[in-house]
Amino acid sequence: MKRSHANNSTGRILAKGRRYSVGILLITLIAFGLSSMLPVSSHRKPGQGYGKEMEVPAGVDLLKTVPGVTRFTFRDEFTIPADFFDKGSRPFAGTVSLKGAPIGSYRDQKTGDADTVIERTQSASFSSGTRSASVPIEVAVLSLESTKPISVRVGRKWQQWNVKFGLSPSRKSGGTLSLMRNRGNGGTFNSEFVVYGLITFTRKTDGAQKSLDIGSMNLDEKSIAKITLRTTGAPWSQSPSRSGANAGFRAGATSAVRVVSFSESSQLANHGVRAVIQ
């Protein structure tokens, strides 16, 4: 009788243990199911999109040059040759500091103090699963001038020449704008584009002019690389405006209302710019 009672007790203990195990298993399964229904963490992995779909339309960007950091260096194959300025003039090599010369208007629209115009020729689309897009760009207008004249040796004398930078009529200037969307309404961008300049020199004493059209020069890839401007990691944001200049996009913007300066740089040049807000 004692042995039978012991067996019954053992059976009850084992049965109770199985019920506990089954209960724990059910609780675990329910908890796992609930956790799978919870919202995904806001910490996105690379490659994941941000929020709803967004499109940055093709458009025109107005920029103004930041003085003090903008310059071009004449050297190597871009050195001004002997006799260019006048008979007996020495070759000119050196760095010229530049500032913006406002254009006033573009396509019959007032442009404030803008001196540079970039055109995004295609729209950039972001789906909820993408965070990068690239579009072609063209430099439509460039209007810069030297902050002071350059000095050129001609024989035993010196001549003073003012310098203006525009765009070559011989070749288009342009490249690519790559947008990264790492916040809901914006992110950062990289750009890479070649600027073929038309450089006009004006002598102070009599207004005589000389021009150098870089677009007409026979340049190899290494030479072109020296005048290819690049920007890396500059901020951008959607613009409140959906029409006109800077429609749907504002370079250098950390928000809809705050804009910072950024630089476009190459081996020979640096162009500090800031978006014009109208």
Image: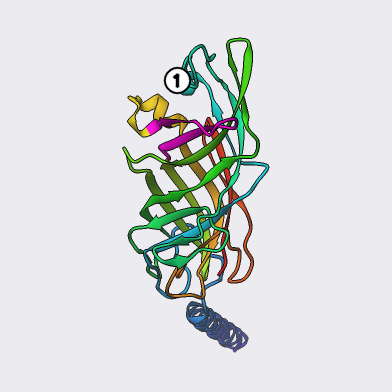
Residue at 46% over, 20% down: 84
Q: Residue furthest right?
A: 68
- The question of residue 169 being in magenta is answered with no
Residue 140 position (above or below residue 243): above
Q: Nearer the viewer, residue 37 or 199?
A: 199
- Residue tagged 1: 77
Instruction: Name the image quarter holding the N terminus.
Output: bottom right
Residues in magenta, as a range: 195-214
Looking at the image, which is closer to me, 234 or 278?
Answer: 278
- Hey, which residue is sitting farthest front in the picture? 206
Secondary structure beneath label 1: helix
Residue 42 in the image, given as x and y percentages of width and height: 56, 70
Q: Examine the residues drawn in magenta and state their main secondary structure.
A: strand
Residue 208 lies within the magenta run: yes
The three-letter amino acid code for the residue at tag 1 is: Glu
Residue 191 place in picture, x, y as percent: 46, 48
Up-down relation of residue 158 to residue 240 (above or below): above
Residue sitting at x 63%, y 32%: 149
Closer to the camera in the image, 147 or 260: 147
Mark 1 neighbour class, 10 Å CA radius: few under 14, some 14 to 19, many 20 or more: few
- Report the number of discs: 1
Quadrant hosting residue 157? top right
